[in-house]
Image (tube, rainbow, N blue to C red):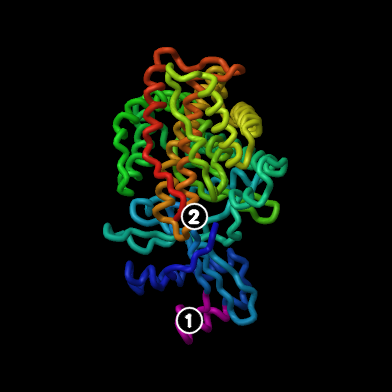
């Protein structure tokens, strides 16, 4: 995550909420409970109390940095250095607008998973949630968390040779933790220790259609680039929404929306963050998010895009284009396709073993055909979502480099969505046909619709 010097807390909060709310946040940040959890010594706490009593809480020397991240929340890091005392740092995560209600829920989810996952991994605690305003005009809460550095697993992967054994080892560790998280989430739901959403089939299908609408189509519209084929895309995606809904209803596990940005690297240790109240969803979604997120992109060859197959073109020439695009995806991802396949297979086997051990119900079982249909459908779904996320990130980017990468990454995810759909329409020699014949016409129409995605070929920021 890149640090950006922009809009300090005082400048951000005073116009929005006033001095009382701003000082309430500072009081919680420097309360004995929070300071004790951060390991601040009693002597330093007493010195702080004397400083506040004589000069006021705003006199505490602080250095504030707003992080540039892909989070929906604004994130600050506040460093405090008091004379010759050991400095300490705190993370402030904002939950603004409709997301305010998620703050206490995430606090409870974090506490649950810290307990359940303690033997397997470290989960960052939420030290406090501070409601600053509950008014309809500017609802805002702030969560306080320990500062663990600014290096996420995603950042760390950029400093290693792509496809290297150490990259696979890091992602294998993350996927093993994910398997425990998904099953323990289901266990917590069944024991009523945490609340998750479990929808009936028709509502689950509507959920996946809504996700494509809200995350892809509405974001482009909000950015002033409405997609003319929006209604057509939703209609053609209907079958694939049903595929994901069926698996979510019959075999759903805790869906976290994880990707390598949700894991901090602290030395050689991976620390989990961001446990939100979410849903019981197909286990395929999280593993696709984790393994296929793609690297930050500094250049993009527009010629690797390729059209849907039409009968009048030579299939061999089209297949050459598809293979070139397939190789390009691997070049811009931290894992090779073989590594993705290996880790995905191992992850799905792990969730089955853990289900047998921890859950009373029988674990999910997939035929080879069902496995492939779900995986490629999930890839189609998730990469379409990522196009929208990257469009959002392009709009909110604080640096030209981030803005340009977000533009390129829209093309990367669009290409992966096309290849996922083509893998169902035209399986390779070692793959069996798993798309029902009755669904081929609509899937072929959807593939042609994807060629109409209005992704601007930007070459500079």
* Residue 49 showing in the rendered view: yes
Disc assigned to residue 248: none
Dot 1: few (<14), some (14–19), or many (≥20) neighbours within 10 Å? few
Q: Quadrant of the C terminus?
A: bottom left
Which secondary structure type mostly characterizes the magenta part of the structure?
helix
Is residue 284 left or right of 199 when viewed as pictured?
A: right
Return the residue at label 2: 402
Indicate the position of residue 351 as horizontal and vertical percent values: 60, 30
Queried whether the magenta region covers residue 54, the answer comes back as yes
Instruction: Look at the numbered disc 1 and give the secondary structure of its residue.
Output: helix
Percent coordinates x, y for residue 108 in the rendering: 48, 49
Residue marked by disc 1: 59
Residue at 71% in and 44% down: 166
Q: Residue 71 versus residue 85: which sits nearer the camera?
A: 71
Residue toward you, 270 or 438 = 438
Quadrant (top left, top right, bottom left, bottom right) of the N terminus: bottom right
Using the image, determine if residue 443 lies above or below residue 156.
above
Residue 200 can be seen, yes or no: no
- Start and end of the magenta stretch? 46-62
Per the model, the C-alpha gap separating discs 2 and 1 is: 35 Å
At x 36%, y 59%, the residue is: 140
Task: Tell whether 213 sits left or right of 48.
Answer: left
Q: Is residue 312 above or below residue 289?
A: above
**Residue at 49% across / 24% down in the picture?**
422
Seen as rendered, the residue at the extreme left is: 136
């Amino acid at each position: 995550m890149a640090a950006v010097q922009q809009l300090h807390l005082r400048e951000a909060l005073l116009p929005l909420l006033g001095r009382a709310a701003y000082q309430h946040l500072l009081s919680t940040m420097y309360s004995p409970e929070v300071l004790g959890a951060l390991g601040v010594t009693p002597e330093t706490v007493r010195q702080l109390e004397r400083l506040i009593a004589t000069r006021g809480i705003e006199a505490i020397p602080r250095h504030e940095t707003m992080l540039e991240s892909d989070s929906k929340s604004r994130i600050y890091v506040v460093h405090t250095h008091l004379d010759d005392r050991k400095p300490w740092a705190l993370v402030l995560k904002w939950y603004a607008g409709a997301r305010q209600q998620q703050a206490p829920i995430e606090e409870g989810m974090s506490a649950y998973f810290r307990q359940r996952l303690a033997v397997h991994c470290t989960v960052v605690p939420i030290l406090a949630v501070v409601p600053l305003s509950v008014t309809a005009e500017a609802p805002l809460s702030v969560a306080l968390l320990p500062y663990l550095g600014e290096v996420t697993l995603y950042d760390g992967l950029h400093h290693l040779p792509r496809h290297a054994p150490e990259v696979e080892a890091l992602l294998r560790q993350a996927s093993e933790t994910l398997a425990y998280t998904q099953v323990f989430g289901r266990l917590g739901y069944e024991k009523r220790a945490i609340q998750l959403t479990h929808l009936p089939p028709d509502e689950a299908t509507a959920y996946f259609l809504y996700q494509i609408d809200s995350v892809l189509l509405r974001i482009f519209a909000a950015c002033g680039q409405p997609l003319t084929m929006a209604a057509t895309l939703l209609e053609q995606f209907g079958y694939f929404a049903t595929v994901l809904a069926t698996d979510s209803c019959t075999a759903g596990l805790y869906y976290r929306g994880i990707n390598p940005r949700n894991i901090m690297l602290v030395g050689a240790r991976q620390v989990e963050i961001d446990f939100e109240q979410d849903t019981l969803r197909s286990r395929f979604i999280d593993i696709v998010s984790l393994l296929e997120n793609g690297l930050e992109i500094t250049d993009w060859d527009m010629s690797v895009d390729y059209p849907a197959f039409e009968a009048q073109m030579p299939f061999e020439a089209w297949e050459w284009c598809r293979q070139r695009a397939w190789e390009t995806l691997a070049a811009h991802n931290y894992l090779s396709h073989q590594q993705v396949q290996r880790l995905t297979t191992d992850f799905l086997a792990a969730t089955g073993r853990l289900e047998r051990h921890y859950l009373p119900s029988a674990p999910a079982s997939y035929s080879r055909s069902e496995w492939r249909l779900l995986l490629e459908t999930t890839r189609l779904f998730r990469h379409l979502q990522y196009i929208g996320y990257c469009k959002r990130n392009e709009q909110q980017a604080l640096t030209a480099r981030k803005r340009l990468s977000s533009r390129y990454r829209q093309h990367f995810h669009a290409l992966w969505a096309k290849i996922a759909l083509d893998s169902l329409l035209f399986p390779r020699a070692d793959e069996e046909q798993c798309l029902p014949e009755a669904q081929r016409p609509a899937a072929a129409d959807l593939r042609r619709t994807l060629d109409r995605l209005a992704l601007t070929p930007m070459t500079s920021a």
